[in-house]
C-alpha cells in the first residue's frame, strides 16, 4: 500500500535528523541511499544500483593516472548521484 503524504513527511523529517552533519561519504553512501528510498517506501534495490561503471569517465580517469569511472548510485533514465549529497546535508 502506498504511503500517505503525512507518513512520507514524517519519514523525511526523521531521515534529515538522522543524517544531519554526516560527513563520511565513502563509508555511508550506500546506507544513505537505502534509507533515502525508504522515506518513500521504496526498495532501492528494485530501482537503482551502486557503483555502475562509466566507460567515458573511466577512460578519462585512467589517462590522468587516477582511479574512478563509477557512478555512486544509478537509476536508469532518472537519477545519477555522486558525493555532492554531503554538501546538501550540511547546508
Image (cartoon, rainbow, N blue to C red):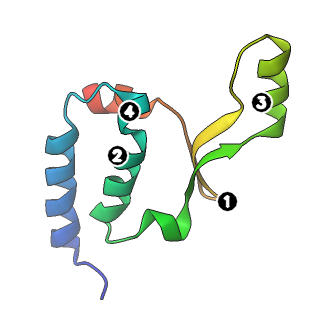
Where in the figure is residue 16, as x and y percent of width and height? 20, 44
Give the label, 3 or 4, closer to the camera: 4
The disc, 2 or 3, on the residue closer to the chain's N-terminal end is: 2
Q: Residue lying farthest bottom?
A: 1
Label 3 near label 2: C-beta < 8 Å? no
The disc, 3 or 4, on the residue closer to the chain's N-terminal end is: 4
**C-alpha separation, residue under disc 3 versus residue under disc 1:** 18 Å
Q: Is residue 91 among the parts visible in the rendering?
A: no
Residue at 85 percent across and 26 percent down: it is 59
The disc, 2 or 4, on the residue closer to the chain's N-terminal end is: 4
Q: Name the residue under label 3.
A: 57
Q: Name the residue under label 2.
A: 32
Which residue is nearer to you in this view: 28 or 88?
A: 28
Q: Look at the image and tell me in which quarter the C terminus lies.
A: top left
The disc, 1 or 4, on the residue closer to the chain's N-terminal end is: 4
Where in the figure is residue 18, as x and y percent of width and height? 16, 43
Q: Mark 4 points at which residue?
A: 27
Residue at 26 percent across and 78 percent down: it is 3
Amino acid at each position: 500500500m502506498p504511503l500517505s503524504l503525512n507518513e512520507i513527511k514524517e519519514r523525511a523529517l526523521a531521515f534529515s535528523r538522522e543524517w544531519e552533519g554526516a560527513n563520511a561519504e565513502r563509508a555511508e553512501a550506500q546506507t544513505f541511499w537505502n534509507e533515502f528510498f525508504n522515506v518513500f517506501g521504496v526498495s532501492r534495490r528494485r530501482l537503482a544500483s551502486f557503483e555502475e561503471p562509466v566507460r567515458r569517465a573511466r577512460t578519462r580517469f585512467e589517462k590522468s593516472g587516477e582511479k574512478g569511472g563509477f557512478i555512486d548510485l544509478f537509476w536508469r533514465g532518472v537519477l545519477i548521484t555522486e558525493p555532492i549529497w554531503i554538501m546538501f546535508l550540511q547546508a
